[in-house]
Amino acid sequence: MTKLLIHNCMALIPDEESELPTLRENLDILIDKDKITALRSSDAKTPPQADQVIDARGMLAMPGLINTHAHTPMGIFRGLAEDVTIERWFNEFMWPLESNLTEEDVYWGMLLGLAEMIEGGVTTVADHYFFMDKAGEAVTQAGARAALGWAVFGDRGYKALDATADFVTRWQGKAEGRITALMAPHAPYTCDDDFLRATVARAKNLGVGIHIHAAETLGQTEASQKKRGLTPIQVLAETGVFDVPTIIAHGCGILAEDIALMKEASAPIGVAHAPKTYLKLGMGLTPILPLQKAGIPVGLATDGPVSNNTLDIFESLRLMAMLQKHEARNPEVMTIPQALDIATRGSAAVLGMADKIGQLSPGYLADIILVDMSGAHHQPLHRPLASLVYNTRASDVQTVIVNGKVIMQDRRLLTLNKAEIIRRVGQNMTRLSRRVPKNRVQLYQPFR
């Protein structure tokens, strides 16, 4: 099968003037192999020829959602670190819990998270975790798209850095081009300057980018300034990180002077925004509007399922829009089209894929989801785009297409056995819930 037709849908497409997302009704979307080839009126007298036709009446077609920063396999620890400070979250829960981690845990945890994300319309994830060969196997099986980075800490030494570079070599472009690989140093406070410089050298040699946590909270930034006279963002600039494409996770402690520095970077920089995690851990918020004003893309993220509890990007979208209004004390801030732009084109830009995904246009990869707008919580459907942002549930996603292939149809996963995945994860719950003390120094004490 090479040609797929989505027939008679509402579709989220770029406005010709503003380029912000807008709605067009009665549309056919034609897909040939892995790309969108045409968008045309469903009323055309000569229907396009296709090997498979999906009747999308009552559905809203939109680009597949993009999760710009996650620790997907961490879902195996979901619910084990609640109502604690960020320091306790790391030191007393996550580091000790992850001492239990095995390669097989990552494989089944990644499959579990991919099943959840596909069911919620997420077609691409930028993942930052351990044993990432197993994550790559899971992504290949699921049929999803991913940018994978094997997280590395400076105290593991340069052999560990070499191993993560080898991972990049093994997986770059695999799974029919659905997998890209990145270098993934954890953070400036767990990787010293020389380690960061060595990471940059390997990234340049491999022709790839970097995915890193930085300026996660304002307190972290202030502590770095007090100890080093530099913000975490300035550390990244001085060590050359911004000489390669970079995904910055969180950035809740990014200052105005940091934004000016990021704007002048020689390579593209994007910031992943995970609002639910920030609310749960009291971290503050990414300065989205100043970043956008400086031309720095911002994308939606969930972070890991231990700090977020779900991998639901529709939830992140809704929280982002409302929190921006709340912080500005202005309900006219972060309009519906602006929020949807971040969820689609903005998130694609953070991953360096703005010319490939995040938009329903001819020539773009066919990563498309169909959202059912017929539920009672959408009615009456006066403004479909308002309902898309503020009313949509993950369970409204009916069909998911990645690279032109249907991987979920009518809520039925076609590539994954969800019951078996849940069974395999569940049988290890007792072992996974044990907090084993860490032997190596990896405590969350950034710059103190």
Image (cartoon, helix red, strand yellow):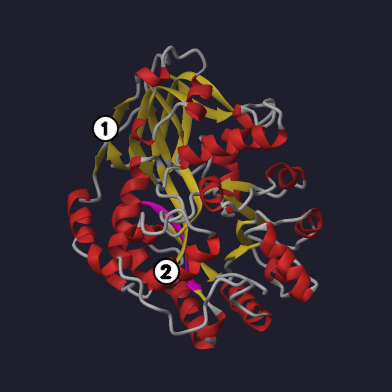
User: Which amino acid type is shown beneath numbered disc 1?
Assistant: Asp
Determine whether, in the image, residue 376 is placed left or right of residue 262: left
Residue drawn 40% across the image and 64% down it? 174
Q: Which residue is mark 2?
A: 171
Residue drawn 48% across the image and 84% down it? 440
Give the image location of residue 241, x and y in percent. 68, 70
Q: Describe the element under mark 1 as helix, strand or loop.
A: loop
Q: Which residue is mark 1?
A: 410
Q: Describe the element under mark 2 as helix, strand or loop.
A: helix
210 in the magenta segment: no
- Quarter the N terminus occupies: top left
Residue drawn 65% across the image and 49% down it? 286
Give the extent of the magenta segment.
Answer: 143-151
Give the image location of residue 320, x and y in percent. 58, 39
Above or below for 169 versus 354 = below
Give the image location of residue 399, x and y in percent. 33, 35
Which mark identifies residue 127?
A: none
